[in-house]
Image (cartoon, rainbow, N blue to C red):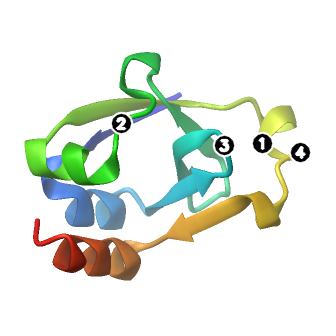
Amino acid sequence: MEIVIDFKNILSELESKKSKLCFLKDRGLFIEDDQKNLYQMEVYRQGSYLDRLIKDGIVVKFNQVESFISKDIGDWEKEIWGVSEVEGFIKRQSL
């Protein structure tokens, strides 16, 4: 399964797909859905900066991580951003 995110419309994308951005320590940017499933960014885009993805309006495909792997990732390793945190980031970065 996969989720496609259009960073040009990141706020509405997160709302409509009931998802959040998830930053994993030393592993990059992921998407977490409302069922706590994790989706990893396509390899080509890994290492991209969030501000650049938003500014350039990049469309990115995220592929679901196997549940046995995502269950081993502790909450302490995750920084979760919902719509309000992403909105705050956009304002801080003047995007």
* Percent x, y of residue 68: 87, 34
Q: Between marks 1 and 4, how big is the CA–CA gap?
A: 5 Å
4 or 26, nearer to the observer: 26
Q: Quadrant of residue 59?
A: top left
CB atoms of marks 1 and 4 within 8 Å: yes
Mark 3, Cα crowd under 10 Å, few <14 / some 14-19 / many 20+, is few
CB atoms of marks 2 and 1 within 8 Å: no
Mark 2, Cα crowd under 10 Å, few <14 / some 14-19 / many 20+, is few
Instruction: Name the amino acid, label 2.
Output: Ser
Q: Quadrant of residue 86?
A: bottom left
Q: Between marks 3 and 2, how big is the CA–CA gap?
A: 13 Å
Instruction: Name the amino acid, label 3.
Output: Asp
* Percent x, y of residue 78: 68, 60
The residue singled out by tag 4 in the image is 72
The residue singled out by tag 2 in the image is 48
**Residue at x-position 53% and y-position 28%:** 1
Mark 1 or 3: the one toward you: 3
Q: Between marks 2 and 1, how big is the CA–CA gap?
A: 21 Å
